[in-house]
Image (spheres, helix red, strand yellow):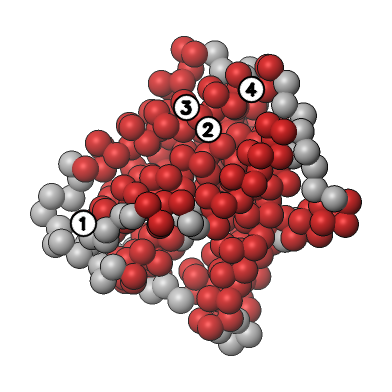
Amino acid sequence: MLEDFLVVTGQVGTLFLLMGVGFLLTKLGKISAHTRGQMSFLLLYVIAPCLVVETLQVELTPSLLILLGEALLAFLASYLIFIPIAHFMFPSRDADTRPVLQFGIIFANTGFMGFPLVEAVAGPDALIFAAVSTIVFNLLQWSYGITLMGGKASARSLLVNPGTISIAIGLVLLFSGLRLPGAVNSAVSFLADMNTPLAMLVIGSQMAHANIRETFRKHRLFEASLLRLALLPALMAVVLLPFHLDPLLYTAVVILSAAPSAGVTSIFAEQFGRNTAAAAQLVALSTLLSILTLPLFAVAARFLAG
């Protein structure tokens, strides 16, 4: 148990060292807000979609199909649990802050941190389950998430976004057995390999621009972070345990449930005129605190999964 904890802590620590590079470069003025925006665009519209496409290029066997169905149900169940809990939180907060905190509780950083964490802890074979999580994440983010933040969801926003398009391409390749041509596949693979280091640099840069001192003075942010990082993943770990899921699937679901608040919390807050400061501070605080919580849940998931 102790050995597993040390191994997982080292793997998670590597990710946070990469974040530290992004933090330091930003403090030194080498990564500006404009540069970070360009890096985020590259991740969102190119690298993350390439990772999804690459991950779904596997041989589809009957057993894998069953596992993917179980994964889809597990991730749907997580949101069916998280959304009602978040709905009743922070009733006294103003209309610009409450939806930001609720959004940050419901939606975890499954894209930028989820894939790297699952790969580091559970191995590359578990990435396909992380890819399934993006299906549910994208559908809910571009429908319920937009509505929660005060926007108006549309069929276009739901269907025409980088996540949905990459998933559609990946599913075609998965179910048809087709594969990308050699040169194209190599290019997609090289771009996908950039996901972990670039995502960590972006998150570190985002944290460098957050007022950490002010963040630590706001107890509401700690409450939201506690829900996001501890209570909800613990609840998922307990709820899924009786179903005796595949160990890799169980570990992936628990780890993704324990990820910090999604970076898109800040993006949506700015887009829909909500409290952008609270959004940035929640993302930064939950990311910082996840240094302590993620290794615990990763080891617990591996132990409970057998």
- Callout 4: 10 Å neighbours few (<14), some, many (20+)? few
Q: Residue flagged by tag 1: what amino acid is it?
A: Arg
* Circle 3 residue: 74
Q: CA distance from mark 3 to mark 2?
A: 7 Å
Number of residues whose C-alpha sits closer than 10 Å to that of mark 2, classed few (under 14), some (14–19) or many (20 or more)? many
Asked if one can make out residue 72 in the rendered structure from this viewpoint, the answer is yes
In which quadrant of the rendered image does the N terminus lie? top right
Q: CA distance from mark 1 to mark 4?
A: 39 Å
Q: Are marks 2 and 1 in contact (CB under 8 Å)?
A: no
Measured from the top left, where is residue 227 in percent x and y? 34, 42
Q: Position of residue 129 (x, y in %)?
A: 61, 34
Please name which of the two marks, 1 or 3, marks the residue nearer to the observer: 3
Please name the residue shown 80% across and 42% down the image.
179
104 vs 21, left or right, is left
The residue at which mark 2 appears reads as: 253
Upstream in the sequence, badge 3 or badge 2? Answer: 3
- Residue 31 % position (x, y): 60, 81
Question: Can you identify the residue that label 4 sits on?
Answer: 65
**Nearer the observer, 85 or 60:** 60
On the image, the x and y values in percent for residue 212 come to 40, 69
Q: Mark 1 or mark 4: which comes first in sequence?
A: 4
- The reply to whether the C-beta atoms of the residues labelled 3 and 2 are less than 8 Å apart is yes
Q: Which corner quadrant of the image does residue 124 belong to?
A: top right
Q: Amino acid at mark 2?
A: Val
Tell me the tag on residue 98. 1
What secondary structure is found at the residue carrying circle 4?
helix
How busy is the neighbourhood of tag 1: few (under 14 within 10 Å), some, or many (20 plus)?
many
